[in-house]
Image: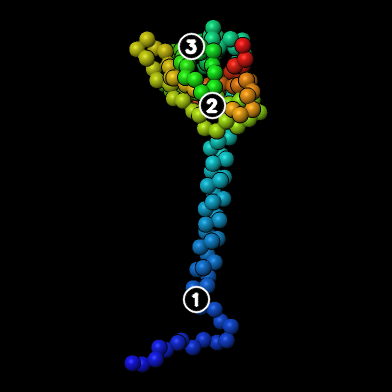
């Protein structure tokens, strides 16, 4: 049996794998920063047109690209209890909704509405739970890329 041979190198020289050991953590940090930036960019709210709607339970109308659109809730919303959101917008091809509490990020809660045979766009939706117990919300409706903000309250 012959003794193992060690490669001779000058005193203090590092093996060729040292740059690779430093490169892996650096690439990981760059990837995490890129993911965080992409998440921020995708989550940032688009500009929304404010729509005044005193009572979403009774429903209200607004102008969407020269056409009258309407929106209404089936019941007064309560966090974590499902209700139906209904939108009518002639010629619309895609409608989605999300809910945000005023002054608090409620995370991702987007709903894609589907069109019924009578032309209404509907979805069963649920307000997210909030530990602060606040009741002031904004419904963000997106109709074919146009975004509308409809403030409402869950307080009676």
Q: Earlier in the sequence, mark 2 or mark 1?
A: 1
Q: Which mark is residue 16?
A: 1
Q: Secondary structure at mark 2?
A: loop
Please count the marks in the image.
Answer: 3
Q: Position of residue 50 (x, y in %)?
A: 62, 19
3D distance between C-alphas at marks 1 and 3: 68 Å
Q: Is residue 148 above or below residue 117?
A: below
Q: Which mark is residue 138?
A: none
Q: Which residue is outermost to the top?
A: 58
Q: Secondary structure at mark 3?
A: loop
Q: Earlier in the sequence, mark 1 or mark 3?
A: 1
**Relative to 21, is 155 on the left or the right?**
right
Residue 65 at least partly seen = yes
Mark 3 Cα-neighbour bin, 10 Å: few <14, some 14–19, many ≥20: some
Residue 67 at least partly seen = no
Residue under the point 46% across and 25% down: 111
Q: Position of residue 119 (x, y in %)?
A: 39, 12
Q: Position of residue 131 (x, y in %)?
A: 61, 29
3D distance between C-alphas at marks 3 and 2: 17 Å
Residue under the point 64% across and 23% down: 134
Residue closest to the eye, 56 or 76? 76
Q: Position of residue 114 (x, y in %)?
A: 40, 20
Q: Is residue 98 above or below residue 19?
A: above
Residue under the point 43% across and 19% down: 123
Q: Earlier in the sequence, mark 3 or mark 2?
A: 3
Q: Is residue 2 above or below residue 85?
A: below
Q: Are marks 1 and 3 in contact (CB under 8 Å)?
A: no
Q: Which mark is residue 128?
A: 2
Q: Secondary structure at mark 1?
A: loop
Q: Which mark is residue 74?
A: 3
Q: Which residue is outermost to the bottom?
A: 2
């Amino acid at each position: 049996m012959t003794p193992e041979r060690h490669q001779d190198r000058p005193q203090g020289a590092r093996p060729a794998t040292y740059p690779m050991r430093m490169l892996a953590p650096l690439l990981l940090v760059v990837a995490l920063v890129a993911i965080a930036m992409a998440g921020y960019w995708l989550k940032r709210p688009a500009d929304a047109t404010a729509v005044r709607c005193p009572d979403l339970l009774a429903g209200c109308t607004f102008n969407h690209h020269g056409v009258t659109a309407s929106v209404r809730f089936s019941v007064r919303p309560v966090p974590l209890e499902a209700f139906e959101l209904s939108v009518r917008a002639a010629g619309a091809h895609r409608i989605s909704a999300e809910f945000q509490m005023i002054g608090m990020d409620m995370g991702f809660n987007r709903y894609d509405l589907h069109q019924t045979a009578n032309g209404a766009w509907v979805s069963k939706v649920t307000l997210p739970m909030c530990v602060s117990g606040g009741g002031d919300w904004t419904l963000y409706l997106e109709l074919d890329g146009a975004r509308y903000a409809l403030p409402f309250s869950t307080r009676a």
